[in-house]
Image (cartoon, rainbow, N blue to C red):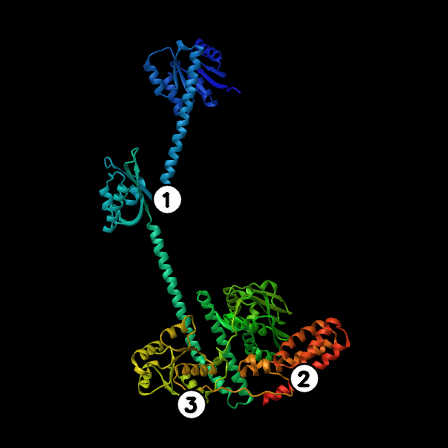
Amino acid sequence: MAVVLKILIMDDDKIDSITISRSIAQSGIIADVDTVFSAKEGLVLILSLQYDLIFLDYMMPDTDGISFLKKIRDLEIETPVIFVTSQGDEKVASQAILSGASDYIPKTLLTPDGVSQSIRNAIKLHESLKLRKITELELKVNSNRLLEAQKLAKIGTWEVNLSNNELFFSEEFFTIFEVEKDNSPTIEFINSCFTNPKDLALFEKNLNIVKRKNKEVQFHHSITTKKGNIKYINQFIKCLNDEKDKPYKILGTIQDISEQKRTEAELIKAKELAEEAVVIKEQFLTNMSHEIRTPMNGIIGFSKVLENTKLDNDQKQSVEAIKKAGQNLMVIINDILDFSKIEANKMTFEEVNFSLSKTVISVIELLISNAKEKKIKLLYDIDSNINDNLIGDPTKLLQILLNLVGNALKFTEKGFVELIVTELQQTATDCLLKFSVIDTGIGIPEDKIDSIFESFNQASNETTRKYGGTGLGLTITRKLVELQGGKITVESDVSKGSEFSFSLHYKKAQDTIGNTNDLDDKKVSPEFLKNIKILLVEDNELNQLLAIKVFKKWDKEIDVAANGKIAIEKITNNNYDIILMDIQMPEMDGIELTNYIRTHMGVKANTPIIALTAHATVGEERKCIDNGMNDYLSKPYDFEVLLSKLNQNLKSSKVQSSVLKVYKNPEITSENLFDFKYLKDLAEGDFAFIKNMVALFLNNTPQTLDAILDSNQNDDIKVLNDEIHKLKSSLSLLGITKASESVAIIENEMLTNPLGDLRKEEVVNLNEICRLAIKQLELIEEF
């Protein structure tokens, strides 16, 4: 489709106007032509309409063409203009072009060809000028953008022409160096701004490298501006080559990174402050632990001493209340310290052989008294297919289970709490175990389940008031599970109970766990202390008195030194077999005293030293061992554990040559009703373990038998099956063969004829066997 040009003819001579119009029409150019005979009329049309081209007479009645052209250009009207004049000299043409005309045509050439050629030239020139202006505008915009970007990024540029050493500095360069822009740029000026001679030498070295090797170089340095301010600069230099591949120009950029440097310095300072805060926090926790544990050691210790004296009922209750309050405080302290370890990413995990069943039974033993007080059944069940000998961290597993089972007992007023261990997956070398703690307690509202794992949080304020606690127990438990690659889940119904479950991977131990922990597990007789000379270094009078009383209970007198100076004097004048060392003391602490003993006490330098410390933060045990101590015991310590550690360290140092004396297992027989071989093999000579297993059976079995009889009478097969299953493992453990045979009959009947009379009769028979076993076991226990 042809383009129609909008053309305006401005000429006071009507003949010329007609001639131009006719020539346009005959030229083949399609145009819409308007004609005016004065500048005034023309200006009105130009301001109201948009023309593609204007024919302008050089001489108008009310103005001349040059003046009119300047006027419309001042009005920013860029329409191409062709001057028409009867004057044919070059002067007029030059004036017209300089004033902004696109072309010039004498009236003698107003032929169709002449007009056509002039129109085409004018349009083409106009388009070219318009394109050039657009390009110039874009270049200007881009240049402004670059300048603004350089200002924002604080980047300046400089150039060196290698042929004449002329320099160019950008606007931002002057800004960075804080000098006026009218200064002449020189290399000497740049050199004069270097703060450090080493930086100047680096700059000159890099310039030479760029020149000689045509390499690109980036480096950092500082400068002192003309106003005396120190700035940090990131500089980049490269070389440009000519067509003969010879260097002809060096380009450089400088970026002011002073703010970045200041930010880095602030971050470093903040990091140092944060690290210092962590150290202060850990030191605070260490001191807090010491300051609280030291008196707590005395409180719990003396309550244990009082327990073994003659007390009336009121006194027994008071002592028990003191002991329980002390133990609760220790739980809170341990929670805070464990939480601190986890927050600091300093929680570590062992990879040692351990017995799964012993770990689970330890949980039951430690919490059974709590269950008895509340008259709640405390049950456990371990899948018989699980390999008992595992590799992992038994201490952390014990902590997790104690927390979950202890929590369940705390929030259960009636019914039972049960710990169940099942196997989810297994290979020849590994197994995935699921631990579930089920209770019939108060339950947790659905909208509170997620929040119970948050730090310092419990299900409600009422829970905190009624049951106490820090709100950290479940937080720590979840972290301990997650740090070992597991995940803890909760299912709960309000007023019905809860189930906490988690799964952990363990490696299977290839060899049966031996007697590596025999000394820890067996009850040690204090008889080995008879000929042993012991020094206690302790500044706290309460703990001195407690230790004296404990050893007096073992018919043993000990020496006491209240500080390091007295201890050195006593060690010099006596031959001690072992030293019990407090860590935090005035004048000379336990670490310093130990170092002195190891380096200045001659033949006595190798005397075994056990650290007795109230510190319980990460690395405290390692710190004691690394500084020459033989063992570590955290306050408040268990008397039996202290006795065991004394025994172990004396034996390992060969100071004490007498044989360790432990209680021997009494022979247990009972008219073929029991076979204790399996239990004895499992206990590996640990009589205390056997006694605990028997105690658990005596405590739990009567309630289980009552539930079995009730469900048998009511034909409640599900409950009967569950209760029989719980009893089954205990019967096998104690070797009550007749009862196990009875259980097999009952289980078969529940599968084949669950409502038959044989099942009911056999349950009655099982009850009689178990009741008899209980009576006989009570006699053996008394024996």
Residue drawn at (36%, 21%) of the image: 99
Q: CA distance from mark 3 to mark 2?
A: 45 Å
- Is 104 on the left-hand or right-hand side of 780? left
The amino acid at mark 1 is Leu
Residue placed most toward the observer, 571 or 17? 571
Q: Which residue is mark 2?
A: 771
Vertical placement of 704 versus 98: above or below? below
The amino acid at mark 2 is Arg
The amino acid at mark 3 is Lys
Q: CA distance from mark 1 to mark 3?
A: 84 Å
Residue 714 position, x and y percent, is 74, 75
The disc label shown at residue 152, or none: 1
- Is 300 on the left-hand or right-hand side of 380? left
Vertical placement of 747 versus 316: above or below? above
| Mark 3 and mark 2 residues within 8 Å of each other at the beta carbon | no
Q: Secondary structure at mark 3?
A: loop
Q: Which residue is mark 3?
A: 530
